[in-house]
Amino acid sequence: MKDMIMETGIQLFGEKGFKETSIQDLMDELKVTKGTFYYYYKSKEELLKDIHLQYINRLVQHQESIINDESLNCEQKLYQIIYSLIHDIKKEGLTAKVFFREMRHLSDENLDVIVSKRDKFRLNIQSIVEEGIVADEFRSDLPADIVTFGILGIANWSYFWFQPDGEKTDEQVSKIFHEILVQGMNGPKNS
Amino acid sequence: MKDMIMETGIQLFGEKGFKETSIQDLMDELKVTKGTFYYYYKSKEELLKDIHLQYINRLVQHQESIINDESLNCEQKLYQIIYSLIHDIKKEGLTAKVFFREMRHLSDENLDVIVSKRDKFRLNIQSIVEEGIVADEFRSDLPADIVTFGILGIANWSYFWFQPDGEKTDEQVSKIFHEILVQGMNGPKNS
Amino acid sequence: MKDMIMETGIQLFGEKGFKETSIQDLMDELKVTKGTFYYYYKSKEELLKDIHLQYINRLVQHQESIINDESLNCEQKLYQIIYSLIHDIKKEGLTAKVFFREMRHLSDENLDVIVSKRDKFRLNIQSIVEEGIVADEFRSDLPADIVTFGILGIANWSYFWFQPDGEKTDEQVSKIFHEILVQGMNGPKNS
Amino acid sequence: MKDMIMETGIQLFGEKGFKETSIQDLMDELKVTKGTFYYYYKSKEELLKDIHLQYINRLVQHQESIINDESLNCEQKLYQIIYSLIHDIKKEGLTAKVFFREMRHLSDENLDVIVSKRDKFRLNIQSIVEEGIVADEFRSDLPADIVTFGILGIANWSYFWFQPDGEKTDEQVSKIFHEILVQGMNGPKNS
DNA sequence: AATGAATGAGCGTTCATTCAT
DNA sequence: CATGAATGAACGCTCATTCAT
C-alpha cells in the first residue's frame, strides 16, 4: 500500500502538481479513505521527499555504474548518461517532472539532502568533461562547469517536449544531442 | 496601480510560486486592501495570463527584430537569440521562472494563446536552423526540430542556475554555448 | 462582531471547554460562517489569549483601586478583595472558569504575560497580609505567602460551587469567609 | 497491563490533559500498539472513569477511617482531613489534577456516580463542622455548608501551587491552614 | 478607486474506534 | 493477548471571490 500511494503520488503530482493534488485525490484513486494515508506517511511532504529521494538515488546509482565502467572513454560515458536521462522519460517522466518542479515544497532540512545529491550528479558529469579535456578528447578552452550546465540543459529539457511514442526514439534523440555536443567540444588543447 | 500589481505578481509568483502566493500577499506588498485587486483584475488567473502574455510577446518581438536583421547570417542570428535569452535573466529572470513553471495554472482557453506564441518562438528558431542548413552553414544530417529543442534546452536551462552576479557574464556564457552549438552543427551537406 | 465573538467564546469555552468548542460551534451561535472568525482573529488561541488578558487586567485594575484606597485598613481591604472575587461570579463566572481551566492552551509566549499578571495579583494580596502583620492587625507567626494561597483558595473555589441565584448572596458568603479569615489571623505579634 | 495503562493515563492526563492525550501517546509510553488498549478498556472514557473512581474511593475510605476514630475531637479530625488532602499531593497530585480538571469528559451516567461520592466526601466534612458546633468547639453563627466549601477551597487549591519539594512541608502547610480555620471558627454558641 | 466584511469550499491533519488475523 | 490496517468524522485554518458602501 505504501508503494501504491507513492506510485499514485508520482502520477498525480506529475500531472497536476503537488499543491494541486490533495490527499483526498490520492486516496480516491486508491479507493481507500484519507486516514489511511497518514498510517503510512506522517505528512504530505514526507511523500514528496520519498519520491525525490527514490528518483535521485536511482539516478546517481546508475550514473556511477556508467562512470565506473572502464571499457568506456569519456565521450562514450557522456553518451550513456545522456541516453539514460532521455530513456528514463518513458518510465520515469512523471517522477522527473515532480523532481524538477516541486522541489520547492520540501522543507530546508529535506531540501539539503536532495540538493547535495543533485549537485553530486552534476559534478560527476563535470568530472567526465574534465577528464575528457585532460585526455585530449575535448577542447581545453571551454570551462567544464558551464559546459556541464549546457549538457544538463539539453538533456533535461527533453522532459518538457519528448514524447516516448513520437516520431523519434529515445536512442535517436540521444544520438543527435550527443553528436552535436561531442563535435562541438572536439578539438586539441588550446585550440 | 495595475502595473504595480503585475510587477509584484511577477516578484512573488517567481519567488514563491503561483499557488503559494495569495492575493493577500500581493496586496500587503502594495499596502492596499484585497478588494482593490478585483477592481483591476477579474481573477488571479487573469493576472497570471497577463504576465505570460507580456513576457512571450516581448520575447517574440525581439526575436523577430533579430531574424529580420539582414546584416546577420544564420550563425550570428543564433548567437543573438541565445544571448538575448540569457541576457534577459538579469531583469526578466523571475518572469521567465513564472513562465516556465506556472503555465499549468492557466485555463485551456488562455493556454492556447500562450502555447501558440511559444510554439511560434520555437519555430522561428527552427527556421533559422533550416536556413542555415540550406546555406551550407550547418550539417544537413541533423533534424532541425530536434536540434531546436536542444538549443532551447541549453538556453532555457540557464534560468535554473545562471547567476547574473556570478563568475561568468551573460556574454561569456552565451559565447560558450554558441561555440559548442555552432561547431557541433558545422559541416557540409550530406556529411 | 469581534466583541460578539469574544462573548460567545467565553460562553462556550466556559461551558464546554476550549478544546471541546470548535470554531464552527462559535460561529453557528452567531449565525455567520467560519471564515468570518479568521477575519477578526488570527487563530483560536488568540481569542483565548484575549479572554485571559481582558479578565486578568480588569481584576488587577480593580484590585489596585482597592489597595490604593487609603480610607481602608488591611482587614477591610481583604474584605473588598474577597467580595470582588465572589461578586464577579455573577457576571464573570464563565470567564473565570476559562481563566482557571484553560490556561494550559496558551503558548509559552502568551502564558508568560498572563502568569506574571496573575502573580502580581497574588503578591498584591500578600502585601496586604504583610502590612496587616506590621500594623498588628494580624498574627505575625503566620507566613504571609502560604496564608495568601489560603485566601485565594477560599475565594477562587467559589467558582466551582457558588450559585448567584442560590440561597446565600455574594455579600453573605464574602462576609462569612472574611470573618473566618480575619478571626483566624487575628492576634498580637509573636503570639 | 491494565494497571500500567491506568498509571500511564494518570501521568499523561495529569500532565497534558485528557483531550490532549491520545491513545497513541498512552501506548507509545508502554511500547505496545494501540489495539491493545481496547482489549482492556472499552473506550477512552472508561479509563477516565476508572481513574476518577479509584481516586474518590480511596479518598472517602480514608476520610471515613478518620471520622470513625473516636479518639479524635472535631478539630483534630479536621486537621487529619486537611493533612490527608495536602499530603496526598506528593503521590496523588496528578490524579487530583485529573479529578478536578477532567470531570467534564465523563458522560452523565458516569458523572452521577462520581458526583455523588464527591458530595458524600463534602457532606462528611460538613458533618464534622456541625458536630463541632454542637460540641461548642466551633461558633454557631457560621453556616456549616458554606464553611465546608471554604475548607475544601483552602485545601484543594493547594493542588495548584503546592510543591512537595518546596520550602514548606505538607505538615507545615496543613498546620498553618488548620490553625487559621480553627481559630477562625472558634467561639461559643451565639457569639 | 478603494475598503471592509463576509462567504464557502477545500485542505492537511488528528484520532477514537473497529476488526480480521 | 496483541498487532496492523483501515475508517470516518471532525477540526483549525486558508483563500479566492463577492459586494455594499
Image (spheres, coloured by chain):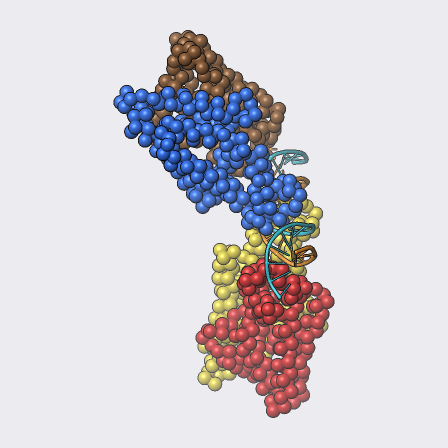
Chain colours: A blue, B brown, C yellow, D red, E orange, F cyan
Q: For this view, does B136 lie left or right of residue B55? A: left
Q: For the view shown, which residue lies furthest in the left direction?
A: A190
Q: Whole-percent x and y of residue C155? A: 59, 71
Residue in front for this viewpoint, D115 or A187: A187
Q: Is residue D103 above or below residue A11?
A: below
Residue in front for this viewpoint, B116 or D33: D33
Q: Is residue A22 above or below residue D180?
A: above
Quarter of the image where one finds residue D125: bottom right
Residue in front for this viewpoint, B39 or B190: B190
Quarter of the image where one finds residue B73: top left
Q: Residue at x 63, y 46 (%)?
A: A34
Q: Whole-percent x and y of residue D134? A: 67, 88
Q: For this view, does F19 lie left or right of residue C188? A: right
Q: Is residue B104 visible?
A: yes
Q: For the view shown, which residue lies furthest in the right direction?
A: D109
Q: For the view shown, which residue lies furthest in the front direction?
A: A71
Q: For this view, does B28 lie left or right of residue C16? A: left
Q: Whole-percent x and y of residue B135? A: 42, 8
Q: Is residue A163 above or below residue C5?
A: above
Q: For the view shown, which residue lies furthest in the bottom direction?
A: D71
Q: Is residue D128 above or below residue D162?
A: below
Q: Quadrant of the image for the C terminus of chain A?
A: top left
Q: Whole-percent x and y of residue A15? A: 58, 33
Q: Residue at x 31, y 21 (%)?
A: A187
Q: Is residue B62 visible?
A: no
Residue in front for this viewpoint, B96 or C154: B96
Total numbered badges shown on the rendered structure: 0
Q: Residue at x 58, y 34 (%)?
A: A16
